[in-house]
Image: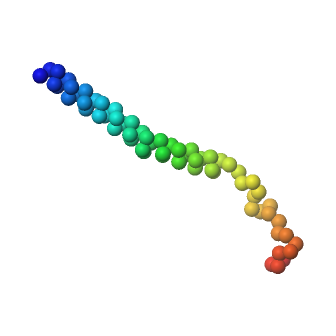
Amino acid sequence: TYAGIMTLLFFFWVYGIVSFGFDLKNKFVPAVRSLRRRASRTDRPLSVPPTAVAQSSDDPLI
């Protein structure tokens, strides 16, 4: 009976490790990636500020 109980406990231990691995892969890693993408998007300045854009001379609204 001792070996059976230890096998059962080992099964639940392995199940917990595998579940944690899947949680990391499917929840935490994508969340960290999206946060890093969002942070890199907000930290990067615009190439040309909108106020510095000049209108061309052939623009009919001038």
Quadrant location of the C terminus in the rendered image: bottom right
Q: How many marks on residues? A: 0
3 relative to 13, above or below: above
Residue furthest to the left: 1
Please state the horizontal and vertical placement of residue 8, each as a whole percent of the image. 20, 29
**42 left or right, relative to 52:** left
Please state the horizontal and vertical placement of residue 47, each as a whole percent of the image. 75, 54
Picture residue at 38% right of the left edge, 40% below the top: 22
Identify which residue, 37 or 8, lies in the foreground.
8
**20 left or right, relative to 49:** left
Identify which residue, 22 or 38, lies in the foreground.
22
**27 left or right, relative to 33:** left
Please state the horizontal and vertical placement of residue 25, each as a whole percent of the image. 43, 40
Residue furthest to the top: 2
| Residue 9 image-quadrant placement | top left
Picture residue at 81% right of the left edge, 78% below the top: 61
Picture residue at 68% right of the left edge, 49% below the top: 44
5 relative to 58, above or below: above
Please state the horizontal and vertical placement of residue 54, each as a whole percent of the image. 83, 66
| Residue 12 image-quadrant placement | top left
